[in-house]
């Protein structure tokens, strides 16, 4: 097989890149380890920035998103018995759109299939060869048959556990990492959301988040210990703990029901520098992870895709390699800003095991400053709706 760009990973980053390249007349093969159904079964991000929505429009796959996405003009922050709203549209002129990662991925797979584009599912033992030469290639096997894809470039979009990042020798990359001493226990339930907007809550029992996917599908999270397992948490225990972390009026109107998904995600920050090695480009979670507070993970994958597809389009159109040569530098500027925001927002709302009374006072003062200061609210809103790229 021969293609211009071999894309490893058929998650949102790989699929969006593939679709945008296709719109520029660039040929790409997506090589995915799992099946389409498996990828679609992963419940992950839910909040899209305007930049993400624009890329979906550019890729020609935004119809369903516009039809079904929930436009949110603000969010509520509840802390220690008081709550306030941050109005994104008033402060920045931009809202966010609540539309699940599952739906984004489904739209992209549908478009890929409708255009007859190649996706290699169930690819085992994927390996990248010669990324530091002018002629890279990718190998994999399926059901005992070996495959080889020759290409000009490789896009490593295979997420945090993928092989692309590991392909770059340790001597050629630096990893900056922070692990947080807690995780998020999340559930999905077929119940109406407790509010029309998201509620981020800090309490002395820990963090909680009320989110949603649609008018009858709610997504809730609570901070939990890293040693917890989803099966330790009955639905009743989850709802009880969630309510205890929310303002009383919110807890009182919460509609509960059986969970249809329950999982724990540890919180972690990780950035790999640089995001390029020869003809291999890392994109999305393959290059960086943020803690979920603020919903930046998926949006950051989109900002990488923006820079990479522009660079590749310019290269194939004019032969000018400046865009691809500067990919890592440009993408990392956005990455570090989003890392900072996710780290700050996580610190604002979570209970850390080693918090001294002074640290708690600082956290409370920081929340009060955000509540009472318009400049701080504007900085928060600008980061939440997404810094421009
Ligand atoms: P992924 O979505 O991870 O896609 C990578 C793809 O590559 C996968 O389909 C995988 O099967 C495939 N792959 C992996 N290894 C190989 C291989 N060797 N060969 C071929 N294919 C391979 N973000 C938010 O904003 N809000 C959230 O609430 C949120 N919750 C999350 C919960 C969890 C459990 C996780 C893991 C992430 C969460 N995120 C969240 C982050 C967000 O989902 C990611 O940032 C986003 O999925 C990144 O997209 P991606 O395409 O870069 O990576
Ligand atoms: C969701 C996840 C987040 O991390 C966040 O900050 C907001 C919403 C969600 O899954 O809906």
Image (cartoon, grey):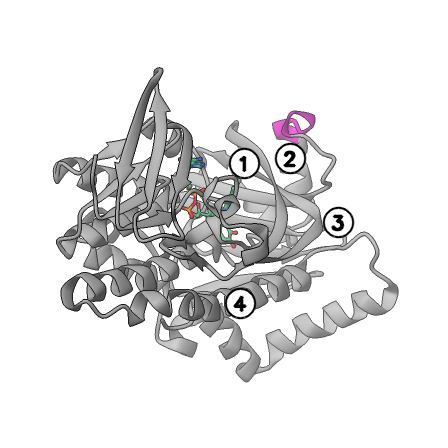
- Residues at circles 1 and 2 in contact by the CB criterion of under 8 Å: yes
- Residues at circles 4 and 1 in contact by the CB criterion of under 8 Å: no
Element under disc 4: helix
The residue singled out by tag 1 in the image is 187
Element under disc 3: loop
Q: Which of the two discs, 4 and 3, sits closer to the camera?
A: 4
Instruction: Choose the circle earlier in sequence order: 1 or 3.
Output: 1
Tell me residue 382's x, y (percent): 45, 74
The residue drawn where x is 19% and y is 67% is 319
Tell me residue 228's x, y (percent): 71, 34
| Residue placed most toward the observer, 93 or 23 | 23
Element under disc 1: strand
Distance from Cα at disc 4 to Cα at disc 3: 30 Å
Residue 86 as seen in the image, left or right of residue 343: left
Q: Is residue 235 magenta?
A: yes
Question: Which class describes the residues within 10 Å of circle 2: few (<14), some (14-19), or many (20+)?
Answer: many
Q: Which residues are magenta?
A: 230-236
The residue singled out by tag 3 in the image is 205
The quarter of the image holding the C terminus is bottom left
The residue singled out by tag 4 in the image is 336
Q: Is residue 216 above or below residue 76?
A: above
The residue singled out by tag 2 in the image is 238
Whether ligand 2 has any atom under 8 Å from the Cβ at mark 1 is answered as no
């Amino acid at each position: 097989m021969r293609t211009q760009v071999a894309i490893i990973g058929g998650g949102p980053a790989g699929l969006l890149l593939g679709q945008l390249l296709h719109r520029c007349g660039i040929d790409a093969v997506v090589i995915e380890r799992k099946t389409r159904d498996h990828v679609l079964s992963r419940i992950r991000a839910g909040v899209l920035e305007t930049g993400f929505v624009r890329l979906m429009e550019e890729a020609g796959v935004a119809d369903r998103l516009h039809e079904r996405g929930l436009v949110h003009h603000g969010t509520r922050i509840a802390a220690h018995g008081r709550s306030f709203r941050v109005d994104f549209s008033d402060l920045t002129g931009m809202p966010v759109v609540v539309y699940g990662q599952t739906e984004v991925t489904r739209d992209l797979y549908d478009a890929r299939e409708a255009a007859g584009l190649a996706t290699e599912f169930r690819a085992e033992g994927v390996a990248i060869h010669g990324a530091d030469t002018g002629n890279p290639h990718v190998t994999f096997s399926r059901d005992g048959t070996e495959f080889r894809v020759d290409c000009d470039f490789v896009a490593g979009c295979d997420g945090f556990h993928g092989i692309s990042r590991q392909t770059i020798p340790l001597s050629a990359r630096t990893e900056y990492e922070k692990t947080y001493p807690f995780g998020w226990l999340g559930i999905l339930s077929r119940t109406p959301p407790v509010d029309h907007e998201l509620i981020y809550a800090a309490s002395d029992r820990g963090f909680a988040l009320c989110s949603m996917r649609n008018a009858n599908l709610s997504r809730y999270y609570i901070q939990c210990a890293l040693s917890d397992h989803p099966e330790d948490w009955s639905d009743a225990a989850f709802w009880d703990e969630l309510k205890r972390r929310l303002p009383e009026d919110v807890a009182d109107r919460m509609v509960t029901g059986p969970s249809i998904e329950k999982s724990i995600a540890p919180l972690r920050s990780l950035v790999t520098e640089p995001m390029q090695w020869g003809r291999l480009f890392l994109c999305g979670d393959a290059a960086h992870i943020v803690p979920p507070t603020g919903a930046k993970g998926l949006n950051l994958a989109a900002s990488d895709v923006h820079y990479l597809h522009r660079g590749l389009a310019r290269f194939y159109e004019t032969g000018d390699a400046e865009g691809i040569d500067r990919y890592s530098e440009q993408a990392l500027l956005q990455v570090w800003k989003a890392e900072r925001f996710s780290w700050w927002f996580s610190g604002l709302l979570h209970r850390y095991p080693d918090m001294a009374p002074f640290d708690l006072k600082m956290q409370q003062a920081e929340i009060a400053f955000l509540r009472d200061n318009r400049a701080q609210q504007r900085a928060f809103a600008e980061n939440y709706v997404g810094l421009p790229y």
